[in-house]
Structure formats: C-alpha cells, structure tokens
Amino acid sequence: MAKKLEVKNLIISFRTNNGTVKAVRDISFDLERGETLAIVGESGSGKSVTARAIMGILAKNAIPEGGEIIYDGQDLMKINEEDFHKIRGNRISMIFQDPLSSLNPIVRIGKQLTEAMILNGKANQREAGRIYKNKTRLLSAEMKEAGVTDVDVKFSVFNSVTKLGSKLESDYNYSRERVESMVKNVEAALIDVLDKEPKKVAKDMRRMKSDAANVYNEYLIDEKKSEVPGLIAKLKEAIPGYISTGKHDQTDAILKELLVPLKKALETTAPDFYAMAFCRVHNAMPAYNGDNDALNEKMEAYFNEKFLNSFAKDIAAGIENSNKKSFDKKGNIVESLNKALDAMKENRIDIKVAKEQSKKCSNEIENALDKLAINKDSIAYTFKSNINSAVKTYAQALKVEKMKHPGKKNRMFKDRMDIDLYQNNIRLGMTRARDSFQSQIDAAEQLNYDQLSHEMVDYLCGEASKRVLKVTKRKAQIRAIELMEEVGITNARQRYRQYPFEFSGGMRQRIVIAIALAANPDILICDEPTTALDVTIQAQILELINKLKEQRQLSIIFITHDLGVVANMADKIAVMYAGKIVECGSADEIFYDPRHPYTWALLSSMPDLDTKEKLDAIPGTPPNMIYPPKGDAFAERNKYAMQIDLEEQPPMFKITDSHYAATWLLHPNAPKVEPPKIVTDRIARMKKLNEESGGESNE
C-alpha cells in the first residue's frame, strides 16, 4: 500500500510559566492508504498534540523541537500558513471531541456544509490551471530535448482537445447536477403528496420547473427523444387538480413515472469527452444511437489511432529523458552524501563543516528533482528545509552552550537543548536521503515508461477537468444533502435548514463528519469523536466511520483513551504514554500478544461483558513532563519495573516485522514475566470468540 503520511522523530514541547512541558518525545509512525491507525493512551500522553501538529493547529506556546511530518512531498512542520491552508480541511480533515463546539450555533447547518465547498471550489480551479500549465511546459521542454519532433504542434492539438473536452464535460455535468436535483425534488414531492401538503408540493413543482429547463443534454436526456418533457407537461396539468381536490392518485403516478427516466439517466455511462473533442475537431463523430458505451468505443478507437498512441510514446520519451537526468545526478548525490557523513563522523560535528556540506548537498538534491514526477519524492522535496533546520538548531545550541550569562530566551533554550540529538538529526537526514536515492537508482530499470506516459495523460486530463469544475450554490446544496444522507441523517432536505441546537449530540457529530468529508480528504483525523456520546450512539458513529473508510478508501487516525473503542476498526495501534509510543503493532498483535506493561494495564482496565473479576485501575498518575523521568516513564506505576527501568529508557524491541515494544522485559537477560491473569483470560476469551465467529471480531 502507498504511504499517505509519515511522521518521523517528532518532538514537541510547550512553554509554560512553570517550565517546558515535553509533550511529544521522538515518535515515528506511517499511515497507508485505506488504513486506520489508532493512537491510544491516557490524557496527557501526547495523542492530541500529535494530531494537532499534523493539522498545523498547535497552540502559540508550542515548541516544535524536531522531526518531520511528510505529506505529499512536503514537511508539514516547515511549510507556511498559506500552503497549509490548501491542505488543512481539504486533504487532511479532522473531527473533534465535542461536536457542538465545532459548529456555529447561529448559522444553519446547510450553510456550514456548503460554504467551504464553494470557496474551496474556486481555489481548486485556480490551482488546477496552474498545475496544468506548469506540467505541460516542463513536459514539452523534456520532449524537445529527447528529440521528439513537432512538439509545439502536438501540444497545440492536445491543448485544444483538453479545452474543448473540459467544456463538453462541464456542460454535461451541469445537466447531470440538475437531473440529480430534480430526482431529489420529485422524491420530496412524492412524500409531500402523500402527506397532503399542497403548499409544499407547489414549492417542489417550482423547483422541478427550474431544473427541467436545464436537464437536457444529448448524451444524458435527449429533449427530442425522452419522455421527460411530456411527463413534466402532464404533471403541470395534474397539480392544480390535486391542490383543489386533494386527490393524489394521478399526481403520485406521474411523479413515480417521471423518476424512472431521471434515475436511468444517472446510471448512464458518461461519454469520453476528450475523445469526443478530438473527433469533433476532426469532423469524425460516429453516428449516435443513444448508447454511450458504443459511442465511447468508436471515439476512443479513432482518438487512439490518430493521435493518442503516438503522443503517449512521445510523452514516454520526455518522461524517460527527465527521469534519466535525475538518476544521473542522484548517483552523484549518493557519493556526496557519503562524503558529508564521513566528514561529520566525529563525536562533535564542526559547525562550519555541517553548514558547508548541508548547503552543497541541498543544492545538488534540488537540482536533481524530477519535476515531471506526478508523485513527489517526499525526502528529496523536504531535504533542504529539514537539513537547514537541523543545522540551525545545532548552531544555536553550540552558541548558547558557550554563553556564561544567557538571556531569558536563550536560558530557556539551554534548559531543554540536547546537542547529541541535534547532531543526530543532521546525520539522520543525510542518511535517509542517501538510502532513498540509492533504492531509487537500484529500481530504475523496472520503470515502465509507457505506463507512466498514460498516467501523465490521465493526470493532465484530470487537472484540465478541474479547471472548469465550478461549484455552484445549487451543486453545493445537492452535495450537502447527499453528505447528510451518507452520514445517516434522515429527512436531510428538511433538516438542511435547521440550526445545530435542533440536532441531538449524535446527529451533531454526524454533521461534523459530513463537513469533514465535504472536500473528499485523503486523511481523516478523529480526535476522540465518541467521548461526549452515550454508548449506543458511540457504536453508531464508529460503524459510520468504518463504513465511510471502506467506501472512500480513507486513511484514518483515530485517537482515543479507550482500547475497546478501536477493537473492531483499527488496522494498526500505537500505544502512547508520556509523549512516547511504547508499543505499536497490528490490532491483533496488540490485543492478542501485548508486551508492554502499560498495554497490559489498559487492557486490564477495559470493561467487557464477560469479565467477572474487578477491573484493575492503573495506580498513580502520569509523570510531570516538565521533568521527564530518566528511565521508562511508566516505571513508577509499573509493578513489573526493574532497576534499569528507573535508570535508562528502553529501546524499541522488535517482536515481529510489524510489532515493537519499548520495555526492558523484552531484553534477553530480563526475567520472564507473564501478563496479569485478567489479561490472559481476556485474550483466551477473545480467541475463542474469534474462532466461533469466523475471525471477525476482536471482542
């Protein structure tokens, strides 16, 4: 699976009147496409701070001391607010704990759902235009350099195809939106007719009349051949009789009959608008008999034969040229990074050497970027900002270390600085880049340039479509109502105009989920979304999030203090305590083979229907993170703690390729300790239940 997010060595502290709180202490994890990662731990463990760092909404007193959050080739810890604004809420969305505080109490739900859609739609149009123009310019230059002839002529044809194709697609989509709107209005009218609401029926009719003028498109509903115009005319005649007599049989029958061609139109395959544009420009449109699939087959055959196949080969030559230039430079970069690491192998790195080497390597890497690549190389794109930040922090630490009487700001920095860590960050950044480039060089021969060229054509056509994808108020309203229905809100059309206080707690959380999904994000962060809800509603919300994940292939980070909540929805679980991940693994590994005493404690305190013994409370309280413990932070509360737990932090011991735990109990010389009886009994019960249910449940 493709990685959607990478968190590497994240360190975040907070400046307070009492001192610096070490909230997140060197944590790392990955999130893959379509995966749910649960981050579990007590309050104050650093879960929500991690989520807020990903969203870029840390408090003003936060001190990001180190680490990277890599998304789409960018380090979210380094980008500016303007760039973050394009990501936050659009590509990474978040659901907060209290739904009422997430909603504006004096604004109708409908407006809160549609406002962002309309604003983001305009921004996305501009961004798509910029991307299309930049990519075609770069591709054209690479194709010329590769020896492709008549590049400008070929791109002139391609640009005319994408321009006309986008216009045809926009016209089709506008008519389709109106058909969708009309279906909703007809369904609403059917309900209002049965409820004997003549005023509402009249209102539904006015909406249908407005939509009816715009539903016609030759490839969706042909006005000359479809029965829709006739049915609408019959409906206009029937409505006055219904309003005066109250008899609804005829009106009801016409409405049901009208739904059939409308829904059939929505099930129709859309034409290939770019193949259609090429055929129209060359006066080669095939005869059309109402079958879009047959039409597409003929148009695509002509488009491929006359232009696209040869153009794709030319694009492949351009991509290969760009790629090989990049690989040649990356080979030199690997050598430069090895020399840089060799020059910085001393216990104390010379700051001049660090600055010289980081500048040299940064320039070489920036010069080696393959700007044509659709998927950005996150390590290459973030190397300069990350290495510069690491060197700058190291330089500041060396300077402050020499000060006899530092000022207040430098004194606070001195209290928390770790020169060894800062040196390691410099070496680690260079090592990662070297290993990444070497693995790319090793895999270069496996690249399929024909496949990459077709991916590039699809990518450019997709950006061309976005340029004309206007989000109108009507389209936003239709989309908002669909979202409300998708998240399980009944009577969505009527409730669209209600205020937040008119919804229950569970329904408000569903609204918040709908708002979070409005921009079709890649990643959804759920920060204890069920804590404020009762148990029954909790189960419904969890089931909804699971369903949406499957339908949309969402990547989800689910934050909770309750392991039981994520038993049936998490793919991976990271257990956090005192700012560190103390155990991580698959859901099965955490539930059936827990290794850290803190994980045992969480499982021991988790209620279920079959536990007869008294649940074990976790003794004591989490440590004061202004003064983090020298050893294992859980040692003071851990009845299995050894002397070494109080003196030294345990490393992450590998249990399997996917399961790790930071506890000295896993050291080869440690005494063998079994989990508490309440945990082993629960594991036995869960295994038995799993066998009986065919392996579908963790509870």
Image (cartoon, rainbow, N blue to C red):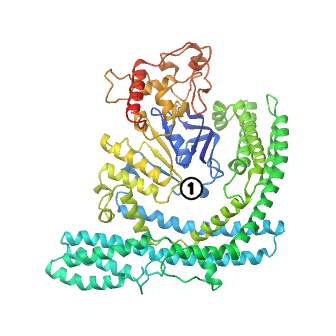
Residue 79 coordinates in the image, percent (x, y): 64, 52
Height in image: 569 above or below 324?
A: above
Residue 417 coordinates in the image, percent (x, y): 67, 32
Q: Residues within 10 Å of mark 1 (few under 14, many from 20)?
A: some
Frontmost residue, 648 versus 192 = 192
Residue 508 coordinates in the image, percent (x, y): 34, 52
Q: Is residue 604 visible?
A: no
Name the residue located 32 percent from the left edge and 76 percent from the top edge: 258
Residue 228 falls in which quadrant of the image?
Answer: bottom left
Q: As drawn, is 580 to the left or to the right of 424?
A: left
Q: Is residue 93 visible?
A: yes
- Residue located beneath label 1 in the image: 87
Name the residue located 38 percent from the left edge and 57 percent from the top edge: 486
Q: Quadrant of the C terminus?
A: top left
Frontmost residue, 359 versus 89 = 89
The three-letter amino acid code for the residue at tag 1 is: Ile
